[in-house]
Amino acid sequence: MANTGKVKVGIIGSQFEADIHAASFQMLPGEAEVVAVASPTPGNAQKLADRYGIPRVFLDYRDMLKEPDIELVTITAPNSLHAQMTIDAANSGKHVLCEKPLCITLDEADEMIDTCKRKGVLLLYAEELFFTPKYRKAKEMADQGAFGRVYLIKQSEKHFGPHSPWFWNVELSGGGALMDLGCHGIAFCYWFLGRPRIKSVYCQMGTYVHGDKTKGEDDCLCIVEFENNAVGLIENSWARRGGMDDRIEVFGEGGVTYANLHMGNALPTYSEYGFGYAVEKAPTTQGWSYPVFDELWNYGFPQEMSHFARCVRGKETPQATGGDGRVVLEVIYAAYASAGQGRKIAMPWKPEGLRTPIEGWLGKLGA
Ligand SMILES: NC(=O)c1ccc[n+]([C@@H]2O[C@H](COP(=O)([O-])OP(=O)(O)OC[C@H]3O[C@@H](n4cnc5c(N)ncnc54)[C@H](O)[C@@H]3O)[C@@H](O)[C@H]2O)c1
């Protein structure tokens, strides 16, 4: 396998997040090139390939894994497939960049991490909030002492529900808004504070709007207590109207900062007639809207992909790994159990008797 020049990338999946990966690699083309895409629905991989000039197309990702020149595989398939795909890719000697959440169960996470370690490949965890320029600025200021000792961080991501049907099926997704969006906030608070030990998790959740579509929660509040006397408050919703909303607040004894990812990077706009695109999951562009610019860059996706390609070349050390994804999953298990049992869960906590995290809320554990 070549270990110089651009890293050759194969993408598994061809829809929402696959498009973001392909676009992001093209935005910072110096480190990597996407040479293949695999997706099972006939025609779909070809459409992505046509949009981004990707030369090779596969229906079965296992065939793509046989291509000797591919060094890094990115996984943008439903959560329930992340583990098997990672294990197959690692067994083929490919580095793995896995979308969030890492997988559904802790057993899967352990097998993914162990297999990648045994095979000597990287397991990179695609948490773009570690690369979001506005949020990185907040962390840079915090690390410089701007706020003194940070005692509270809030992160929230909200919209009116996912774009693809599998997200609503908890067997395929592993859970609702907490699993889908809370994984970002948990990872963010943990990373922002310098990865301290987690002391406890407390969570309130419910299905308020989408009970016709899912057994999963569509709104939740999760409080994570860290060892260094700091707290993360993670708010997520699939019930919030008006398109994507993503923001943080950082409170220290010596200062505070607020960052609203979209509103600060948007043009308050009124249009009688509507136009092409405003922001992710916005239902309309007529009337008042808040179109964003450089959306992928402001999220940090191209920077994330470029960093991970540099890791494959040994030029940088991974800033987000399978280990981070596993910590997030531990918190998610505890959060569902907390909501199910109506109590704070002291960490570390072993989710005995639970296969998937959401079972802790749906009734397998003392709800
Ligand atoms: N980082 C982020 O902000 C972010 C945003 C959206 C999605 N995601 C994550 O990315 C992943 C994909 O989500 P999405 O929104 O792109 O979903 P999607 O439904 O838009 O696309 C899923 C893709 O997986 C493919 N797929 C299904 N079964 C497959 C198989 N056996 N082999 C190969 N491909 C298969 C589908 O054909 C489709 O192309 C999820 O894990 C999701 O949580 C992350």
Image: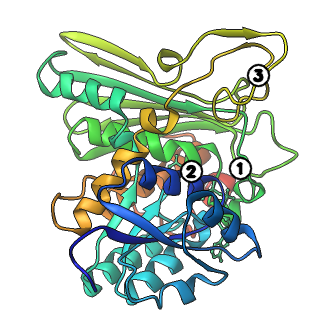
Q: What is the basis of the colouring in this image?
A: rainbow
Q: Is residue 85 left or right of residue 80?
A: left
- Give the alpha-carbon distance from disc 3 to disc 1, as whole Å: 29 Å
Q: Quadrant of residue 348?
A: bottom left
For the residue marked with disc 2, what is the amino acid? Answer: Met
**Which residue shows up at 31% across the image and 59% down it?**
308
Q: Secondary structure at mark 2?
A: helix
**Is 333 above or below relative to 225?**
below
**Is 187 above or below relative to 152?**
below
**Is 130 above or below relative to 363?**
above
For the residue marked with disc 3, what is the amino acid? Answer: Thr
- Mark 3 residue's CB less than 8 Å from ligand 1: no
**Is 227 above or below relative to 334?**
above
Q: Is residue 341 left or right of residue 106?
A: right
Ligand 1 falls in quadrant: bottom right
**Which residue shows up at 83% across the image and 10% down it?**
272
Q: Secondary structure at mark 1?
A: loop
For the residue marked with disc 1, what is the amino acid? Answer: Gly
Q: Nearer the viewer, mark 3 or mark 2?
A: 3
Q: Quadrant of residue 86?
A: bottom left
Q: Which disc is residue 179 wearing?
A: 2
Circles 1 and 2, Cβ within 8 Å, touching? The answer is yes
- Give the alpha-carbon distance from disc 1 to disc 2, as whole Å: 9 Å
Q: Which residue is mark 3?
A: 285
**Which residue shows up at 37% across the image and 32% down it?**
232
Q: Which residue is mark 1?
A: 216
Mark closest to the chain's N terminus, 3 or 1: 1
Local crowd size for mark 2, using a 10 Å CA cut-off: few (<14), some (14–19), many (≥20) = many
Q: Which percent across, then down, holds residue 356?
A: 58, 65
